[in-house]
Image: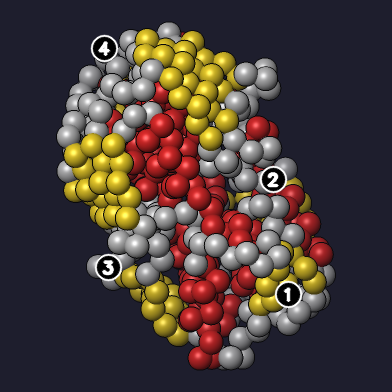
C-alpha cells in the first residue's frame, strides 16, 4: 500500500507501448470466494486479487467458521466449503467500504443458524442496503438496519433460508440480486426472485451466473425472473480473470498518448462486461484488436461522444479522464446509481475536473466533459480507488497534477502506481 499523502504524476512525452496483465478481478474474486465457501468440498482458486476488499471478505469467511488458506504471493486461496451450512452461530463482521463483501455476506449469513452483525466505515454506513434486506425479509429472514437508516450496520437473525418467492430491486445496485442469487441454491426449497423495476450494471448478473455455473449450479432465467431449485455447489479449481475495470486505465493510457497497450488475459469471452470499455474508446477513434487471450488498443486522435455507460459504469470515471483530450464534448449518461458507490462519483468527478480548470457539467444521471487546457492542481480522491486511478491519466498529459491519498488504490489495486510507472518510464 502506498503510504504517501500525495503523488505527483509526471507527464508522458511520447506514445506509450507495452503489455500488462492486471491483478485478478475484485468482482470475480469475491463472488468465487462466497460460492467456494458454500460448496461441498475443497476449492483451489488461482489469480486471486489481494486487496482490502478481498482481505475483508477472507477475514469474514474465517469468522464464519470456514477453513481458508490464502497465499497472497502466489495469488491463490484454498477453501473448504461448508455445503451451504454456515459453521459459526454468531459473528461480528467488519467490511470497511467493500460493497460486494457486505451485500454478498448479508445474504450468505441468511443461510446460518444464529445472529450475525455486519458493519463498515463511515461511508459504508451511508450506502444503501434496504432493497436486499426487503428481499431477505420476504423469504422469512429476520434482518434489520441496526440504526434504522436503511444502511449498515446490519443484523441478521436466521434459522436458514426457507425458499419461496421474493421480489428484488436492482435499481440502485445489481449486487443485491447477485447476493440473493448466490445464496439461493442453499435454501431448503425452490426459490424465485422476481425483478422489480430496471436493473443497473446488468453484465454483473451474467458474471454471477457464470461463477455459479462453474461450481455446478444452474439458474432458470426468465424475463424478469430467476428460479433456483435447491442444489449443491461443487468445490474445484477456479481461475480468476484479470480485472477488466483495472484494465480500463491502461486502455485509457493508450488512448491519451496515441500509444499501443495490450492487456493480457482478457477477451470477448470474459465474464466481465467492463472489457467493453474498449468499445467506447473505439467510438472515440481508437483501434481495438481482440485476441484469444488479449485485447490491444491503439490510440488515435480522439473525438467526443455521447454514450450510455449503465452497463459498464465502473469505467465511467476512466472515460471522464480521457474526455478532456478529445476534439469535442463527451456526455456520459444513465449512471445515476454510481452516486451510491464509494463516493458520489458523478459529483466527485465533475468537482475534480473543474478543480483542474476543465469545463464539466453535472447531470442527474451523468456528466458532460469539454476539451480544453488543464491547470495544475491537487486531485481529491474521496477514499475512492477509482478516482485516484482515473485522474492519474490526466496527469500523464498535463503537468502539475498531484493525486491525494494514492494509497486508496489498495481497495482493489495496491500496486497500480508501480505498474503504471513501469509502463510509462521508458517513454518519458
Q: Quick one: SS at disc 1?
A: strand
Q: Is residue 44 left or right of residue 131?
A: left
Position of residue 267 measured from the top left corner of the image (x, y, whole percent):
31, 63
State which quadrant residue 17 falls in. Answer: bottom left
The residue at 37%/69% (across/down) is 21
The alpha-carbon separation of the residues under discs 1 and 3 comes to 34 Å
Label 4–label 2 contact, CB within 8 A: no
The alpha-carbon separation of the residues under discs 1 and 2 comes to 22 Å
Considering only order in the chain, which callout, 4 or 1, is on the residue closer to the N terminus? Answer: 4
Q: Quick one: SS at disc 4?
A: loop
Label 3–label 2 contact, CB within 8 A: no
Residue 263 visible to an observer of this rendering? yes
Q: Quadrant of the N terminus?
A: bottom right
Residue 283 or residue 167, whichever sits in front:
167
Above or below residue 369? Residue 424 is below
Residue 307 or residue 339, whichever sits in front:
339
The residue at 52%/23% (across/down) is 117
Label 1–label 2 contact, CB within 8 A: no
Q: Is residue 403 left or right of residue 20?
A: right
* Residue marked by disc 3: 293
Q: Which mark is residue 401?
A: 1
Considering only order in the chain, which callout, 2 or 4, is on the residue closer to the N terminus? Answer: 4
* Residue marked by disc 4: 189
Q: Quadrant of the C terminus?
A: bottom right
**Number of marks drawn:** 4
The alpha-carbon separation of the residues under discs 3 and 2 comes to 34 Å
Above or below residue 205? Residue 27 is below
Amino acid at each position: 500500500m502506498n503510504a504517501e499523502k500525495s503523488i505527483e504524476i509526471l507527464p508522458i512525452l511520447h506514445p506509450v507501448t507495452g503489455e500488462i496483465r492486471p491483478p485478478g478481478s475484485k468482482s470475480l474474486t469475491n463472488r468465487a470466494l462466497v460460492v467456494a465457501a458454500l460448496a461441498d468440498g475443497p476449492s483451489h482458486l488461482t489469480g486471486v486479487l489481494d486487496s482490502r476488499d478481498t482481505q475483508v471478505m477472507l477475514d469474514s469467511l474465517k469468522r464464519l467458521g470456514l477453513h481458508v488458506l490464502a497465499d497472497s504471493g502466489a495469488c491463490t486461496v484454498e477453501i473448504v466449503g461448508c455445503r451451504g451450512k454456515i459453521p459459526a452461530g454468531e459473528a461480528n463482521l467488519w467490511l470497511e467500504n467493500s460493497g460486494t463483501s457486505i451485500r454478498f455476506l448479508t445474504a450468505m449469513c441468511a443461510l446460518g443458524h444464529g445472529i450475525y452483525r455486519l458493519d463498515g466505515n463511515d461511508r459504508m454506513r451511508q450506502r444503501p442496503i434496504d432493497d436486499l434486506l426487503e428481499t431477505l425479509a420476504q423469504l422469512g429472514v429476520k434482518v434489520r438496519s441496526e440504526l434504522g437508516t436503511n444502511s449498515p450496520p446490519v443484523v441478521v437473525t436466521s434459522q436458514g433460508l426457507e425458499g419461496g418467492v421474493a421480489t428484488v430491486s436492482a435499481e440502485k445496485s445489481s449486487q443485491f440480486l447477485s447476493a440473493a442469487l448466490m445464496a439461493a441454491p442453499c435454501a431448503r426449497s425452490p426459490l424465485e426472485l422476481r425483478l422489480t423495476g430496471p436493473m443497473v450494471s446488468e453484465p454483473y448478473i451474467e458474471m454471477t451466473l457464470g461463477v455459479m455455473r462453474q461450481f455446478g449450479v444452474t439458474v432458470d432465467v426468465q424475463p424478469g425472473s430467476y428460479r433456483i431449485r435447491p442444489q449443491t455447489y461443487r468445490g474445484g479449481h477456479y481461475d480468476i480473470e484479470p480485472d477488466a475495470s483495472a484494465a480500463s486505465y491502461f486502455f485509457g493510457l493508450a488512448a491519451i498518448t496515441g500509444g499501443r497497450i495490450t492487456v493480457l488475459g482478457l477477451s470477448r469471452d470474459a465474464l466481465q462486461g467492463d472489457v467493453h470499455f474498449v468499445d467506447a474508446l473505439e467510438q472515440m477513434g481508437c483501434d481495438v484488436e481482440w485476441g484469444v487471450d488479449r485485447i490491444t488498443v491503439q490510440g488515435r486522435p480522439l473525438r467526443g461522444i455521447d454514450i450510455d455507460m449503465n452497463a459498464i459504469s465502473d469505467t465511467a470515471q476512466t472515460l471522464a479522464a480521457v474526455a478532456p483530450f478529445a476534439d469535442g464534448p463527451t456526455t456520459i449518461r444513465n449512471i445515476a446509481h454510481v452516486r451510491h458507490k464509494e463516493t458520489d462519483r458523478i459529483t466527485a468527478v465533475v468537482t475534480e475536473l473543474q478543480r483542474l480548470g476543465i469545463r464539466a457539467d453535472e447531470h442527474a444521471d451523468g456528466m458532460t466533459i469539454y476539451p480544453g487546457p488543464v491547470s495544475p492542481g491537487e486531485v481529491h480522491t474521496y477514499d475512492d480507488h477509482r478516482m485516484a486511478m482515473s485522474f492519474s491519466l490526466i496527469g500523464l498529459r498535463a503537468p502539475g497534477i498531484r493525486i491525494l491519498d494514492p494509497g486508496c488504490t489498495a481497495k482493489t489495486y495496491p500496486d497500480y502506481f508501480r505498474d503504471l510507472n513501469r509502463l510509462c518510464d521508458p517513454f518519458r
